[in-house]
Image (cartoon, rainbow, N blue to C red):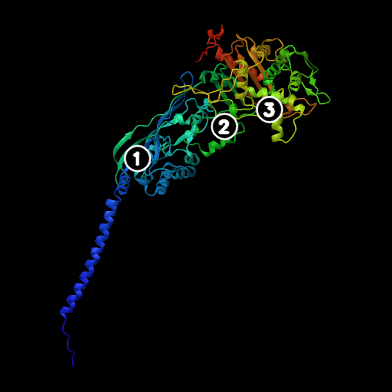
Amino acid sequence: MPQPIPLKDHEKEKHLVNRRLLVCAGLTLGLVAVLVGRLYVLQVLQHDQQSAVSENNRVHVLPIAPERGLIYDRNGVVLADNKPSFNLTMTRERAGDSARVLDALAQILGLGEEDRVQFDKDLRRGRKPFEPVTLMVGLSEEQIALIAVNQFRLPGLEVQAQFIREYPLNEHFAHSVGYVGRINEKEAKSLDATEYRGTQSIGKTGIERFYERELHGQVGYEEVETNAQGRVMRVLRHQDPTPGKDIILTLDAHLQQAAEKALGDRRGSVVALDPASGDVLAMVSKPSFDPNLFVKGISFKQYAALRDSIDRPLFNRVLRGLYAPGSTVKPEVAIAGLDSGVITPASRVFDPGYYELPNYAHKYRNWNRSGDGWVDMYSAIMRSNDTYFYDLAHKLGIDRLHDYMAEFGLGQKVSLDMFEEAAGLMPSAQWKRATRRQAWFPGETLILGIGQGYMQVTPLQLAQATSLLASKGVWHRPHLAMTVAGEQPVDPHPMPDIVLRDKRAWDQVSQGMQMVMHDPRGIARASAAGAQYRIAGKSGTAQVVAIRQGERYNRNKTLERHRDNALFVGFAPADHPSIVVAVMIENGEAGGRVAGPVVREVMDAYLLDEQGHLKAQYAGGDHTSPHS
């Protein structure tokens, strides 16, 4: 029998539907309330913050790198210039998968793994959103064409015209002007991120580094509006960058060329100073290198070749080379003896070819083994007599000798604007106790008196000590910058002048140095032959390796790089000095015979005109520099 069908309860269903509607309505109202509340927070409470975020997503500030200041020699010859270059930049936000894009770029241009790794390093550096990063500098026409054809595969990459550094004279001023190179990770962390936005290079050595702040300039900017894909729609604001300041150096390109020619292919250095001002007229360190290699980013292979070369072309011998000065410091030792009253110009010492300390059997040899007989101060300087200066050093003592040599700048930094300069070493008894924990021995004082032993100086310090002889004790720090943006640099820590008890000592020592060059028995008379002006000079031959007692130096049994260094210092014209020259030739052996002619050639290039005649300003004692 079929079951009866129950009747619907419409009233009950109506209440059920109404309850469901009310629940849905409540949920809807709740969600609307949450949405309205959130909108209120965003639009009212956080209005300023969200507006700024929105604006940053739409408006970007792009840096404009300043043009680097130029560097000239004293006569207006450009030593560091800026040239236009097509560079490849990447904006990571526009590239999407940057790794894939860079892989494609390396394949298209046929780049090696070294370049690909460098791209990743460049992109990892700190930067702001939408700020382009320079990946390649100095693109060739072929590279530009390949990038243009394959642009669809290289989103975010763009070829831009920018300025890069150029050194027109290549290796000739590499050690003085220096060079710029890519900013590395360590430098990027220490630099002002705002000041160096958009800048890819920084001064690494020389003037480029010392005056980096002045040469760099101030960055400009462009405020641009972009769409969602990062494409620039319009420029909202533009601020031009402030270019770097131009620098005029004291260097003379003509004299630099003459000094390099005189030095030839030998390893060594030449420094020429103006004793009246401290201007560095020439600064040569050989061998040298092409600084342009570092501007675009030198390859590992090229850098390794320079770094590992036995001739050390990257090494600035003028500022960092430490050498025993040899007999070139004998004039300063003579000044110490005269001023302290230990000797007079007429004081004589008998030279049998050696010197012996009282109660010691050791013989300290003169370079002339047969001896020079009785010698006074003048003939001791003229003949570079070691025995005389052994005796003088012994009478002075190490403490007094140290103090006088320090007044001439030996064993300390002397330059005004050459940060790479080494301090050298002027030893003392106190120094030896502190560093070697040993007492000072009398024999060490003797060899210090002829510029050997622990003493180490740079060629620049040797030139400055000679400049003080020429200027009669007036200190002018050697400097490379003549003007920076038209203003002369100021020495913040001037050195005190050397004041002697009897000023005649300057002329007396100068007379001995002139006899070196012009007396018939002078050891460097050949270098002054035919000179139209008087030269005051002093040679030096310094040992590189020690020779045992009783042995003689034999060049044929000595390795080339163990042979003596050849040095020579001088100033001219002797009665009114206008140029000081110091020459150091590594393993050149004979200072007077090898380094002396180099000094003469540099002086001739500065003091003589094109016809080989003495320039008019030097004929009557005019102190004005011919190249100022």
Question: Which is closer to the viewer, label 2 or label 1?
Answer: 1
Pointers 1 and 3 in contact (C-beta within 8 Å): no
Question: What separation in Å lies between label 2 and label 1 (alpha carbons)?
Answer: 40 Å
The dot on residue 455 is: 3
Q: Secondary structure at mark 3?
A: loop
Q: Give the number of marks.
A: 3
Residue 314 disc label: 2
Residue 564, by quadrant, is top right
Q: Tell me which label, 1 or 3, sits earlier in the chain.
A: 1
**Tag shown at residue 61:** 1
Q: Residues within 10 Å of mark 1 (few under 14, many from 20)?
A: many
- Residue type at numbered disc 1: Val
Mark 2 Cα shell of 10 Å, populated few (<14), some (14-19), many (≥20): many
Q: Residue furthest bottom?
A: 1
Identify the secondary structure beneath mark 2: loop
x then y, percent, for residue 119? 45, 43
Q: Please state the horizontal and vertical placement of residue 422, each as a whole percent of the image.
A: 60, 30
